Image (cartoon, grey):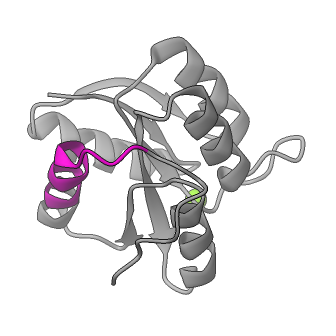
């Protein structure tokens, strides 16, 4: 069981991820709807894993990539799973280079989300932005 923070500007998407991951036995410790709120909650809640939506309305210049960077610097052991939409391959690649553990693409199947989260939580990899991309699919 992991402590999970869900970040997405869509309430519907947060509910969907929350339901899938609760069903898997995880504890949803918080939800954020933008990058700024996500960074604050990350520091406060110290989750084991964050699902981070790539496309969110910007708040004071914050975006998903800067939130990811802040999280990786704050806690290199936390896993960040990017939630992408189709056509965001370049941004996803950059996020992986910046230390994200993996990604899922919307629309997704609940079983696929559960599987990716299991594998991310099992991986021993510590986020290191200096490492080369490990993107393989
Ligand atoms: Mg979004």
Q: Which residues are magenta?
A: 114-126
Furthest residue toward top: 44
Q: Which quadrant is home to the C terminus? A: bottom left
Q: Is residue 61 above or below residue 54?
A: above
Furthest residue toward right: 60
Is residue 116 toward the left or the right of residue 111 in the image?
right
Which residue appears at 46% of the width and 58% of the height? 82
Q: Is residue 73 above or below residue 67?
A: above
Quadrant in the picture for residue 92 = bottom right
Residue 119 sits inside the magenta stretch: yes
Q: How many marks?
A: 0
Which residue appears at 11% of the width and 62% of the height? 111
Which residue appears at 72% of the width and 34% of the height? 36
**Residue 131 image point, x, y percent:** 53, 61
Residue 127 sits inside the magenta stretch: no
Q: Is residue 24 above or below residue 91?
A: above
> Which of the pair 99/22 is nearer the observer?
99
Main SS category, magenta section:
helix
Q: Which quadrant is home to the N terminus? A: top left
Is residue 5 toward the left or the right of residue 57 in the image?
left
Q: Quadrant of ligand 1?
A: bottom right
Which residue appears at 17% of the width and 66% of the height? 112
**Residue 34 image point, x, y percent:** 66, 41
> Which of the pair 75/42 is nearer the observer?
75
**Residue 93 image point, x, y percent:** 55, 74
**Residue 32 image point, x, y percent:** 55, 33
């Amino acid at each position: 069981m992991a402590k999970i923070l869900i970040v997405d500007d869509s309430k519907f998407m947060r509910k969907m991820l929350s339901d899938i991951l609760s069903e898997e036995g995880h504890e949803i410790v918080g939800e954020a709807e933008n990058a700024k709120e996500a960074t604050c909650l990350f520091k406060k809640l110290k989750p084991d894993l964050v699902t981070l939506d790539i496309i969110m309305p910007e708040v004071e210049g914050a975006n998903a990539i800067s939130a990811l960077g802040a999280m990786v610097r704050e806690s290199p052991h936390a896993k960040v799973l990017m939630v992408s939409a189709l056509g965001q391959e370049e941004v996803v690649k950059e996020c992986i280079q910046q230390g994200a553990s993996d990604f899922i693409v919307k629309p997704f199947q609940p079983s696929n989300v559960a599987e990716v989260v299991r594998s991310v939580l099992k991986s021993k990899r510590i986020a290191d932005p200096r490492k080369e991309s490990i993107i393989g699919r």
